[in-house]
Image (spheres, rainbow, N blue to C red):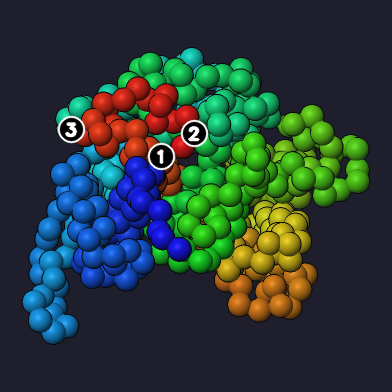
Amino acid sequence: MSRRPPTAIDQYEALATVVRLVRRGRARTRPELGAAALLGRTVISQRVEEAISLGLLEDADVAPSSGGRAPRRLRFRSEEGLVLSAVLGAAALDVAVTDLDARVLDHRHLEWPVAHGPERTFDFLDEYFAELLKAHDPAQLWAVVIGVPGPVEFATGRPSQPPIMPGWDGYDIRGRMQRRHGVPVWVDNDANLLALGEARSTGLDDDQHMIYVKAGTGIGAGVVSRGRVHRGSKGAAGDIGHARVLEDNSVMCRCGRTGCLEALAGGWALARDAVTAVHEGRSRYLADIHRATGEITPADIGRGVVAGDAWCLTAVARAAERIGSLMAALVNFYNPDCVVFGGGAVAGGDTFLRVADHTVRSRALPLAAADLTVRAAVTGDTGGVVGGAHLAVDMLLSADALAAWAPGGRPSAVEPDRLVAGV
């Protein structure tokens, strides 16, 4: 059977593969690219030259010889572009500018309640994005990524009935930011970006699977499978905070339903219960805080754990057991290589992680838990913005996006909607 002639799609698939392998450190020389991509020498040579002409790759140092002429290593030119990322939480947000390797060039962690609404929030973000770009060439901006603490319809970039984001439902985040910055904009759930940032920062192999659990004021999860975020058909995958785990109609969640995991184990729920504990005289530590400030925050409970307060220790352990119990069911269902816990719950000592680990292992099937790693996240405040940068660069260097912008030489050569749609 004769082989069909190569098409333009084949060309950009090969180009995307070559750039991805070099960018991810999977192959650094032309012979390594041929072996990893299963492509012939001529195709590799053509695609490498095309990537060099686009400013994506360059020849670097010489690799050790394995016999004969030593090959040149290739380097991904991460300095070619910039990405702006912002990840919003219930009460604070992170903003950063990164290069195309998701290296953070500048970062801010800022107190800002998401309940201020979209217009005030994006006016606030515009100010800090402009500040972050002062030290850089604005013409190098390739993309903007926004993470929000609620469900997002990924195809449109619009929040969908987010329980803790009044005024945000259906808001056109993508349109607002594309009009402001003139570059492609992607919007995702914050847990998905945290999961992708953690996976890439810790070198999760492309054949591995991870569930990242954000246990903070609210509870959510992101699933990374074979190097990509699994969002489901609409973008709702991973919203474990609103799984019903208690048949008790008296426990009301912020989403309006009852018995949700978040209403029992989320940081806001622990703070609610802490006020009751103070009134009942069950925590002198929290009573002193309440007397001084008039409120109790999830962070106060975390500090209470470190201080050894009995009520705080018991409350956090109970929350960890409830979250771990649901995660055991998901470990049986999904059989990941690792479960990673991030968010404020893991900042207050090792109580949460120790109880969650024990619960997952004791309730999951032995086969599913046999080689399972359960650990705390390592990326900290920058995990979400790093994940956002990886998301944008993955999208812009995909075969479909390259087919749209490579003929013009830069992503700015085409309308942002063309790069976002269908990618």
Measure the C-alpha gap from mark 3 to mark 2: 30 Å
In terms of sequence position, does the residue under pointer 3 or pointer 1 come before the other? Answer: 3
Q: Secondary structure at mark 2?
A: loop
Q: Secondary structure at mark 3?
A: loop
In terms of sequence position, does the residue under pointer 3 or pointer 2 come before the other? Answer: 3
In terms of sequence position, does the residue under pointer 2 or pointer 1 come before the other? Answer: 1
Q: Residue at x 74, y 66 (%)?
A: 332
- On residue 136, the disc is 3
Measure the C-alpha gap from mark 2 to mark 1: 8 Å
Whether residue 84 is visible to the viewer of this picture, yes or no, is: no
- On residue 422, the disc is 2
| 13 to the left or right of 196 | left
Q: Nearer the viewer, residue 381 or 75?
A: 75
Q: Nearer the viewer, residue 302 or 180?
A: 180
Type of amino acid at the residue the image marks with label 3 = His
Type of amino acid at the residue the image marks with label 1 = Asp
Q: Residue at x 32, y 71 (%)?
A: 35
Measure the C-alpha gap from mark 3 to mark 1: 28 Å
* Residue with the mark numbered 1: 400
The percent coordinates of residue 113 (x first, y second) are 53, 27
The percent coordinates of residue 185 (x first, y second) are 41, 29
